[in-house]
Image (cartoon, rainbow, N blue to C red):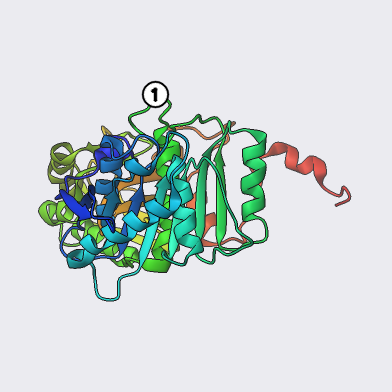
Amino acid sequence: MSEGINQAAPAERSRAAIVAADGTRFEACLVPPRGGGGPALLILHGAAGLDASTVAWCKRFADEGYAVLAPDLSRHFDGHAFALTAALADVAAARSALGPHLEAGARCAAVAFGAGASVGLRLAVHGAIDALALYEPTAVVDEDGAIACPVTAHLAGNVSSSMRAAFERFAAGHARRRVYFYDGSSPGFADPSQPSFDRHAAAVTHSRTLAAIRPTIGPHYDLARLFQEHLKHEFVTHDPHATMATMVAQPYVNHVPTLTGGFGHDMLKRFYTYHFIPKLPNERRSVVLSETVGPDTVVLELVTRFTHTVEIDYLLPGIPPSGKTLEIPTVIVAKFRGDKLYHEHIYWDQASLLVQLGLIDPKGLPVAGAEEAHKMLDQSRPANDLMARWRESDGKPI
């Protein structure tokens, strides 16, 4: 399962018939948010028009809680650029279709692709949108700093030096503008339909886009609380059905050191039901060291102490219970789609656990046992003991 837009959960989609100011009819793709109204989001297509990729983007952002509209502006594209006045008039006409799907006081952002960036930038100049994200824009216009709303731009790493310089000038001195170049990527890197698609870069672009849009227009989810609800069903109520209900339709979980978890609903529910929840140790306590909440991500850093009373399938598969008390620092990266958990990546140092169990002899190896956890809980504990050359710098000028 990739992080690409083609993996979005199915959303109700309609083709809205729009009447332009000149009486001409054109279509728009309309995808309401799950479970009611939301903020407005315009998708502005590029040279390819209202194609399958654009529709997929609509579904992807609807999953994030937006009422999404993508007007078909193809009739205003001459093969190189949009006729901006006519395109803007069609956007204005199309926005009325969002009315029934908007929350009270809804604000509006736009996500523009390729040549559609010129339409998005002009909307921003006119103050018609509250935030803007650009994917591989073909040009940039500042118009003497008239753009007041947040703008984030994503460009392939191999864009021309003149394009790079133009966008660097666009962002320079503006705290609300962000320009990202994805080194090693080629045009189409964020589009799953393209051979150059880079799913890792695409995932980062999406989070950065949400970072530009969500603080300004919402929706504002309490991701920390939502994640605690998920953890409660795992570790307190021990309910796999309730645990799965906090997640998207096709989630995944990866406990990185042991490659345990699940990929998709059925595999993950099987994992939770038979190999995770019933195999948790009876005595377990975690100390949270830090919590970082982003636009779609929660990162928890913690130290967990537990008694090894059962064979813990996800943590120590195949290792019979030792009765020992084990301590381990852990990092959990939880990513959301809207208000549902999409995936978890859980990291810890497996070597530290194996040292504590006596299954690895740490002598002569750069590994530590429970000292890892102790150092995280008390920063004043000694450092660099595993680094023999540390003594060589003793007394040298600093």
Front residue of this view, candidates 395 and 6: 6
* Outermost top residue: 195
Disc 1 marks a residue whose amino acid type is: Pro
- Is residue 373 placed above or below 135 in the rendered structure? below
Residue placed furthest toward the bottom: 105
Q: Residue furthest right?
A: 397
Q: Residues within 10 Å of mark 1 (few under 14, many from 20)?
A: few
The quadrant holding residue 88 is bottom left
Task: Give above or below for 176 relative to 272.
Answer: below
Image location (x, y in percent) of residue 236: 20, 62
Above or below, comparing residue 10 to residue 306 in the picture: above
Using residue 341 as the reference point, say whether residue 329 is left or right of it.
right
Number of marks drawn = 1
Q: Position of residue 24 (x, y in %)?
A: 24, 50
| Residue 164 visible within the image | yes
Residue 157 vs residue 90, the one in the foreground: 90
Work out which quarter of the rendered image holds the N terminus and state it.
top left
Q: Nearer the viewer, residue 308 or 138?
A: 138
Q: Callout 1: helix, strand or loop?
A: loop
Where is residue 263? Give x, y as percent.
23, 36
Disc 1 marks which residue? 195
**Residue at 24% from the left image edge and 43% from the top image edge:** 8
52 relative to 123 in the view: left or right: left
| Residue situated in front as seen by the camera: 362 or 63 | 63
Q: Residue at x 25, y 53 (%)?
A: 62
The x, y position of residue 199, in whole percent, is 39, 34
